[in-house]
Image (cartoon, rainbow, N blue to C red):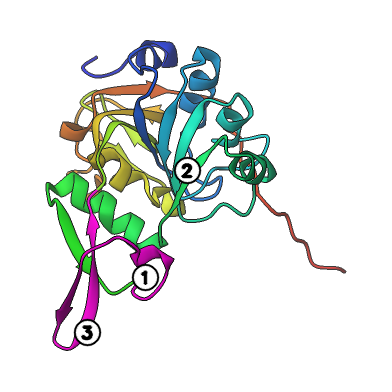
Amino acid sequence: MGKVTGSVAAMIEQIHDGATLIAGGFGLCGIPEKLILGLRESRVRDLTVISNNCGIDDWGLGLLLENKQIRKMVASYVGENKRFEQQFLSGELEVELVPQGTLAERLRAGGAGIPAFYTATGVGTEVAKGKEEKVFDGRTYILEKAIKADFGLVKAWRADPDGNLIYRKTAQNFNPLAAKAGKITFAEVEEIVPSGALDPDQIHTPGVYIQSVFAGSDYQKRIERLTVAEN
């Protein structure tokens, strides 16, 4: 079965205290929920987690905050999580806020082997403090370093036994970037199909970036803020 593993626990047991993790997802869409639940059960601690956001109080990465397993969070948006706010203000949680486009590019650069790049985003703000500046064609840019991590955790729609992945619609989001920027990447998927069943032109993440694949079930389709129109 190639890279297919029978349990989340078999993947999670490789993650150690103090590890750096990149988690795919955007809000609650496309998050590696089974892997996050596995991390909560393992109680591995002092994690540095890089993700677009930190979930909500009772789901996603917010579950790891509840267990106080995260030491540092690198994210673009943190507005849906009261526990995040409380731990940051109390000094329990170290936070690095990164503009969303910069975060995406830092992950892409890490996966591509590019050590750093210049961007105009954040010039003249708190984001630029302590960073090298350079002028190109009369405009100031700051140097941003690539992000790489010990582990990448991603959620995909389909996989084959070789670890080739296809994401579904907006659930693709940060997952391909997280997959490539992790030195070791674990993928949970909704369906594993036989080798050769995936159209090569439709594969989003080649299996060379994936070390283990797990097929989950009973995925939740949760919404952060449900808004309905009045009749």
Marks 2 and 1, how far apart at CA: 28 Å
Marks 3 and 1, how far apart at CA: 13 Å
Q: Is residue 43 left or right of residue 206?
A: right
Of the residues shown, which amino acid type is indicated by label 3? Arg
Q: Position of residue 193 (x, y in %)?
A: 32, 28
Q: Earlier in the sequence, mark 2 or mark 1?
A: 2
The secondary structure type at the circle numbered 1 is loop
Q: What residue is rendered at 12% in x and 46% in y?
A: 113
Circle 2 packing at 10 Å, graded few (<14), some (14-19), many (20+), is many
The answer to whether mark 2 and mark 1 are in CB contact below 8 A is no
Q: What residue is rendered at 36% in x and 17% in y?
A: 16
Say which of marks 3 and 2 sits in front: 3
Q: Say the numbered circle drawn on residue 42.
A: none
Query: Does the magenta segment cover residue 140?
Result: yes
Magenta residues? 122-146
Q: Earlier in the sequence, mark 3 or mark 2?
A: 2
Say which of marks 2 and 1 sits in front: 1
Pick the front one: 54 or 191: 54
Image quarter of the N terminus: top left
Q: Say the numbered circle drawn on residue 122.
A: 1
Q: Which residue is mark 2?
A: 30
Q: Which residue is mark 3?
A: 139
Q: Is residue 144 above or below residue 120?
A: above
Pick the front one: 226 or 120: 120
- Residue 196: quadrant of the picture: top left
